[in-house]
Image (cartoon, grey):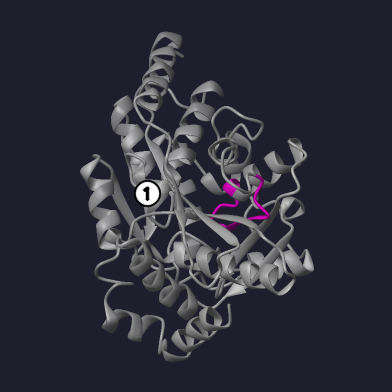
C-alpha cells in the first residue's frame, strides 16, 4: 500500500473540512408555543446538500485509516441517494471511481448529483437488493464496499471531533434554554442517532433523544420487540427508515421512539417550508412532526424549554416527487386527514 497516497488523501479530506464552516442552527418561532424554543440544525448547507456529508467524510477517513481504500480503489455504496451523493463528492476529491447501488425510484435530482460528481448509478428494483448487489460489485471489481449501514455508528467519533452532537450543544450555549429537553431525528443508517445518543450520555446531559420512524420501516417495531430478524418493504420517505434492522442502529441510546405516518411527514414538510420560506425534504417533515408532538407534551405538563431537530436536506431535491401533488396522491395517498391532524395539533397548542 502506498502510504504516501493515503496520507495525501487524508490531508485532502481534512483540508476540505477546514474550508467548510459549520452548519447553521436556525431558531423557529411557533406562535402557539411561546414558551418552547425550536431549533433546526440545517444540514442542507453542507457542500453536498445533506446530513450525509458528515457520514461520507467519516467513512472515507475510516476506510483510509483501516487500509481498505488505496490509490485507484473502486468505491461501491448501497444508498437511497443522499449518502451516495456525498460519497461521490469525496471519490472525485480523491480521484477514485465510484458506483452507487440505488433503488430505481431514487429522486432524479439525487441521481443527477451523483453523476455530476463523476459517480455511476447501478439500479435495483427492490430496495432490499442494494446490499447483496453492492457486495457482488465490490468483489467483481476488487473494490471497497463502504457499507454505511454497518460502519456508520463506528466511523464517527461520538466523543467530540466536531461531530453533529458536539456542534449542536456548542451552538446552543447562549440560548435561553441551552440544554435541550429533546433532540428529535429520524434514522436511516442509525449512525447519527447513535452519535447523538452516546454524546448526550458521555457529557451527562439531561437531554433525551427521540427517534421518529416512517411507515414500513422496521426500526420502531425493533425498538419495541428487540427482534433483529424483522423485515419490511422499504420506506416511502427517502433517506430514513429501513427494510431490515441495520447494525448501526443502537436502540439502547434512544430514549423514545414514535412512528410517523408518511402523510404526516409530507404535510408537515410543506408546513415547515412555509414557515421557513424555503423548501425542506420529507425526512425533515418527519422530524418536525415528532418535535411538535414533544412540544405538545411539554406544554401539557406546564414545562418550558427547547427542542432541537434536523433539516436533513433541501426540498429542491424533490420537485418531481414530494412537491408534486399528483405524485404524492399516487404514492403516499390522500393527505387530507393528515392536514387536518396537523392543523388540529397547531390549534390545540
Left or right: 47, with 163 as reference point: left
268 or 305, nearer to the observer: 305
Tell me the element at label 1: helix
- What is the span of residues highlighted in magenta in the rendered image? 179-192
Q: Is residue 67 magenta?
A: no
Position in image of residue 232 (x %, y %) = 58, 72
Q: Is residue 35 shown above or below 236?
A: above
Position in image of residue 253 (x %, y %) = 73, 50
Q: Which residue is mark 1?
A: 44
Q: Residues within 10 Å of mark 1 (few under 14, many from 20)?
A: many
Which residue is drawn at the image coordinates 60% and 39% (left, top)?
169
Quarter of the image with the C terminus is bottom right
Q: Does residue 105 show up?
A: no
Position in image of residue 14 (x %, y %) = 42, 21
Q: Is residue 182 magenta?
A: yes
Residue placed furthest toward the top: 4
Name the image quarter holding residue 138. Answer: top left
Position in image of residue 30 (x %, y %) = 49, 67
Amino acid at each position: 500500500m502506498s502510504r504516501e497516497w493515503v496520507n495525501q488523501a487524508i490531508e485532502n479530506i481534512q483540508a476540505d473540512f477546514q474550508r467548510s464552516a459549520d452548519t447553521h442552527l436556525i431558531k423557529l418561532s411557533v406562535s402557539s408555543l411561546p414558551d418552547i424554543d425550536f431549533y433546526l440544525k440545517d444540514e442542507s448547507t453542507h457542500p453536498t446538500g445533506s446530513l450525509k456529508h458528515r457520514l461520507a467524510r467519516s467513512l472515507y477517513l475510516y476506510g483510509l485509516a483501516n487500509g481498505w481504500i488505496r490509490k485507484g480503489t473502486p468505491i461501491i455504496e448501497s444508498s437511497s441517494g443522499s449518502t451516495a451523493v456525498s460519497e461521490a463528492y469525496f471519490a472525485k476529491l480523491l480521484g477514485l471511481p465510484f458506483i452507487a447501488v440505488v433503488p430505481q425510484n431514487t429522486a432524479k435530482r439525487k441521481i443527477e448529483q451523483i453523476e455530476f460528481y463523476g459517480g455511476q448509478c447501478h439500479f435495483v428494483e427492490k430496495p432490499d437488493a442494494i446490499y447483496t448487489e453492492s457486495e457482488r460489485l465490490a468483489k467483481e471489481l476488487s473494490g471497497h464496499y463502504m457499507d454505511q449501514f454497518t460502519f456508520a455508528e463506528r466511523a464517527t467519533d461520538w466523543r467530540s471531533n466536531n461531530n453533529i452532537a458536539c456542534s449542536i450543544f456548542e451552538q446552543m450555549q447562549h440560548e435561553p434554554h441551552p440544554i435541550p429537553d429533546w433532540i428529535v431525528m429520524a434514522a436511516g443508517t442509525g449512525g447519527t442517532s447513535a452519535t447523538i445518543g452516546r454524546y448526550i450520555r458521555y457529557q451527562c446531559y439531561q437531554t433525551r433523544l427521540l427517534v421518529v420512524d416512517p411507515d414500513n420501516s422496521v426500526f420502531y417495531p425493533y425498538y419495541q420487540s428487540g427482534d433483529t430478524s424483522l423485515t419490511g418493504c422499504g420506506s416511502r420517505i427517502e433517506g430514513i427508515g429501513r427494510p431490515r434492522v441495520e447494525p448501526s442502529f443502537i436502540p439502547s441510546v434512544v430514549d423514545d421512539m414514535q412512528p410517523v405516518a408518511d402523510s404526516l411527514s409530507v404535510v408537515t414538510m410543506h408546513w415547515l417550508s412555509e414557515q421557513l420560506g424555503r423548501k425542506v425534504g420529507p425526512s425533515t417533515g418527519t422530524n418536525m412532526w415528532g418535535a411538535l408532538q414533544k412540544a405538545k407534551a411539554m406544554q401539557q405538563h406546564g414545562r418550558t424549554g427547547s427542542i432541537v431537530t434536523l433539516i436533513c436536506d433541501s426540498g429542491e431535491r424533490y420537485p418531481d416527487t414530494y412537491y408534486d401533488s399528483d405524485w404524492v396522491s399516487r404514492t403516499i395517498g390522500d393527505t387530507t386527514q393528515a392536514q387536518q391532524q396537523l392543523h388540529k395539533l397547531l390549534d390545540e397548542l
